[in-house]
Amino acid sequence: MADWTDCLNFGISITKQASEVVLSAFQQHKEVKLKSSPADLVTETDQRVERILISAIRNQYPQHRFIGEESVAAGEHLELTDSPTWIIDPIDGTVNFVHRFPFVAISIAFTVNKQTQFGIVYSCVEDKLFYAQRGRGAFLNGEPLFASGQQDISRCVVVTEIGSERDDVALSTMTSNICRLLKLPVHGVRALGTAAVDMCQVATGGADAYYHIGMHCWDIAASAIIVQEAGGVVMDTDGSEFDMMSRRVIAASSASVADCIAQVIQAFPCRRDDEDPCRCAATGVNRL
Ligand code: LIP
């Protein structure tokens, strides 16, 4: 069985280097552009960090492939193949970055044969490096991570995101999901503004569940394996097996908490990350 430890160590090294660009820009004025909605932002730093990461990886591993948030936004075709692939979110929490809200992360997942081999999430301002390698555990700054194991939904802190959707269907679905959870009741609902760091809280045991509809593969591919390697459960919001391209996810401390959340929340229709936009236009469901 191939050992991807060298790739992981290389990924951690370039993540830390690239974070210096994020941190040096964090307090500066940013030029902001809009993508799919008034809340879906991108800055020159997002694009620059992605270029730095892809260039360094391509130099070290010329045969590897990439799925990068800003490359896809610039029109690059998104296809996950069996080739070794780096799935990159250069700044997860761009709205936070623009507003200097201190939860911004570089998120990198690595897949082979469409199976995630490792994930890296570096919360730059907090200086918290989360990582996990398949079958070898999850870590925060070198210390092992363990999910809470909580089985009782009424004793859970649940993390979610409203995301960048602003149409009525998405907003009413997401706000009613939060209300239904609060009425169960759960102990609390939280949102940090970055899916990657949100989901890593489940791996630390500081939260007991995370769910999201509408995020993208680059937001959660790395944190999904970090939760799994910390002993947590990751699945689709309909209860089926986790599919990083579906734009729906539940990560939880236990199967019973995950199942309970799957029963309570509703999803809204989203185009899969790997679905052809033209085909969706024909079917009418073309949420970006
Ligand atoms: C963000 C996610 C966050 C979500 C935002 C946005 P980005 O990713 O991490 O959870 O609420 O809408 O999608 O765009 O900052 O990389």
Image (spheres, rainbow, N blue to C red):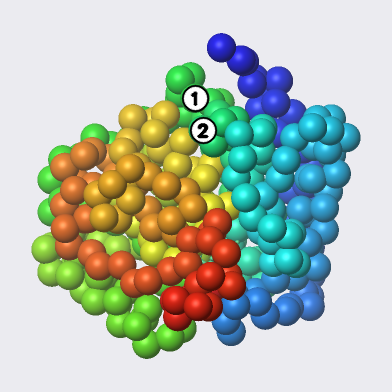
Which one is closest to the eye, mark 2 or mark 1? 2
Residue at label 1? 134
Binning the other alpha carbons within 10 Å of mark 1 as few (below 14), some (14 to 19) or many (20 upward) gives some
At horizontal 42% and vertical 47% (from top left) the residue drawn is 243
CA separation in Å, label 2 and label 1: 9 Å
Q: Position of residue 63 (x, y in %)?
A: 79, 32
Residue located at (77% from left, 74% from top) = 30
Task: Indicate the quadrant of ligand 1 in the picture.
Answer: bottom right
Quadrant of image for the C terminus: bottom right
On the image, the x and y values in percent for residue 151 come to 16, 40
Dividing the picture into quarters, in which one does residue 44 lie?
A: bottom right
Q: Amino acid at mark 1?
A: Arg
Visible residue check, residue 127: no
Sequence-earlier tag: 2 or 1: 2
Left or right for 203, reference 91: left
Q: Are marks 2 and 1 in contact (CB under 8 Å)?
A: yes
Q: Position of residue 106 (x, y in %)?
A: 65, 49
Q: Which residue is mark 2?
A: 115
* Between 163 and 152, the one nearer to me in the picture: 163
**Up/down of 16 relative to 159, above or below:** above
Name the residue nearer the viewer: 134 or 195.
Answer: 134
At 32% from the left and 36% from the top, the residue drawn is 232
* In this view, 174 is above or below 246: below
The answer to whether 5 is drawn above or below residue 193 in the figure is: above
> Taking the image as drawn, is residue 184 in sight?
yes
